[in-house]
Image (cartoon, rainbow, N blue to C red):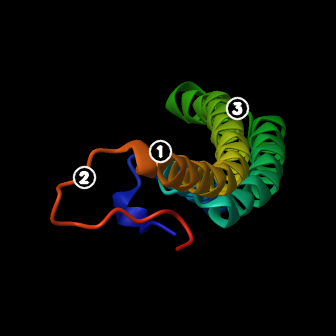
Amino acid sequence: MPDKKDDVYGDHISHKFNDELMALKSEFLEMGGLVESQVDRAITSLVENDGHLADEVRATDKKVDQMEIDLDEEATLIIARRQPTARDLRLVISVIKMVADLERVGDEAKKIAKFAIKLSEEVRRLEGTWKCATLAIMFLACCTMPWTPLPVSIPSRRCGS
């Protein structure tokens, strides 16, 4: 939790109100860090074709969703109980709005992760296709080898001989 000296919102007569604002701010920053990590890991899973990392990102989305609900409820209770004014009210309203945006960013990270999973499955399928294609090319090369002009010094070989 940030130190009270770092609090730019000032001291209030009620220390409990200060603590509630600091807790709200800390939880918001924690959620922001989690969403930032979620986006980073989603992009990494896409770039590195890592389906397991993408699954972790998708699982993290539930925690982000719950954090949004908790922070929204906590901010609403602060407004109801403390009736903040001026900058305190702006802080609480801003947190409510930003939390909704962070949750949407988390949803987009989940979509990236879903795409990464589909892509990794396609790549696995393509790897099998690539092996078959390589065998077909080798077979084709063997079939055309008897008609390929070879230097006179090298004896002509047929496939399988």
Single out the mark in the foreground, 1 or 3.
Answer: 1
Q: Residue 118, image x and y in percent?
A: 73, 44
Q: Residue 122, image x and y in percent?
A: 70, 45
Q: Which residue type does callout 3 highlight? A: Ala
CA gap, disc 1 and disc 3: 64 Å
Q: Which of the labelled discs sits on residue 144, or is there none?
A: 1
CA gap, disc 3 and disc 2: 71 Å
| 12 sits left or right of 6 in the view | right
- For the residue pair 121 and 28, the one nearer the viewer reads as 121
Q: Residue at x 58, y 29 (%)?
A: 94
Q: Which residue type does callout 2 highlight? A: Leu
Residue denoted by label 2 = 150
- For the residue pair 159 and 135, the one nearer the viewer reads as 159
Neighbour class for label 3 at 10 Å: few (<14), some, many (≥20)?
some
* Of callouts 1 and 2, the N-terminal one: 1
Residue 140 seen in render = yes
91 to 71, vertically: above or below: above
* Of callouts 3 and 2, the N-terminal one: 3
99 to 65, vertically: above or below: above
Single out the mark in the foreground, 3 or 2.
Answer: 2
CA gap, disc 1 and disc 2: 12 Å
- For the residue pair 46 and 41, the one nearer the viewer reads as 46
